[in-house]
Amino acid sequence: MQPITAPIKPDSRGKEVVHLQSALLLLLQKRVIKVLGPASRSLEQEISRLIEKLQSELREELFGKVTTQIVQFFQIQQNLGDRLKGVVEEKTAQRINEILKELGALDEPIHEKQYTVNGTVLNTYGVALANYQAEAFVITLQKEISVGKTVTGKSGTYTLSFKNPLTGAPDIQVRAHQKGDEKNVTRSVVRYNASAIEKLDVIVNAEKEKQDSEFNTILKDVKAHLGKMKLSELKEDKETSHITYISNKTGWDGRVTAMLASAHKLGEALKIDPAHVYAFLRAGVPGSEDAVKSLSMDDAKATIGNAIGKTSYLITEIPPKRSKHLKRFQLATF
């Protein structure tokens, strides 16, 4: 890993920013930088959230708000001052380099050098793939050496750091697959003579992908936190914060979580499949019984068809049941 050189200021871009962000990622992963989050999130969830946001800025080579916040955490915890506003000056750069050297991540020979590879796992339609196993390999003529594995976050991103097992610059490839589906592995390009920081995306063929719908994915995550409550019972008002709680626990956007709850409430009231109601809400239909009833059969069919389409994949539909569900919708609207 390259040493940090001062000064580096917020809103700047370039390789020096990338070197800083790579160092901060390592310090977060090694728990050198301590993180405190809201009571609704565990320490691990807060660290994962910060790492994912930092990775996003790293891909843009941008010293953004998240990088600034993490630098400030480091400066305060290392007693460097609380008035530096995230600027990496000489003392901050020196302290980061000292810690990197203590961790064995700095000024090492090539065969012991720290490498970081990051990127996104997505399908051929550009949809980010969460919860995919990503594994990095160093490729040689005789063998392939696994150097680390992780699981992609909700935005499909991953980061892996490892020490080079070879005496020369490594050739790196990243492979990804769904958990439990090790036979269907997708490979990135091979980055020959890799530098210390590389970006490798993995593009999965959407036609072969065993993908669950957005509706089912969120439903599975939310149900784990419901206890004895029904989804249709979730509320959000001055006295009750069910949606906020569930959103913070799962990491899903509050608006999407609210749509899921509304879909089940309206589905129960109108005797319609809540997955179909979810498709209507995601298409911009207001969340009221009257608004759903006002949809024509043609509009309902088109909306559901678009939601099932591979490029959106909001809901899953079993063809034999489709006409029965649409007939229920037709009855509910009259």
Image (spheres, rainbow, N blue to C red):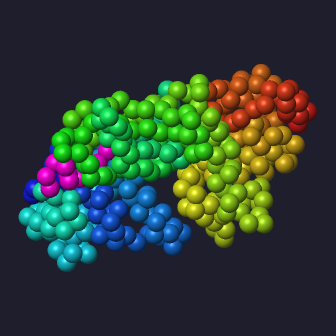
For residue 240, side relative to residue 205 (left or right): right
On screen, residue 40 above or below 193 = below
Residue 173, horizontal then vertical, whole percent: 35, 36
Residue 231, horizontal then vertical, whole percent: 75, 56
For residue 172, side relative to residue 44 (left or right): left
Residue placed at 68% from the left, 60% from the top? 224
Observer-nearest of 169 and 304: 169
Observer-nearest of 121 and 42: 121
Residue placed at 48% from the left, 50% from the top? 151
Query: Does residue 1 appear anywhere in the picture?
Result: yes
Residue 199, horizontal then vertical, whole percent: 31, 39
- Seen as rendered, the residue at the extreme bottom is 79
Quadrant assignment, res 298: top right
Residue placed at 19% from the left, 68% from the top? 102
- Seen as rendered, the residue at the extreme front is 142
Marker count (numbered): 0
For residue 226, side relative to residue 199 (left or right): right
Residues in magenta, as a range: 108-119
Magenta-colored stretch includes residue 110: yes
Residue 297, horizontal then vertical, whole percent: 81, 25
Quadrant assignment, res 95: bottom left
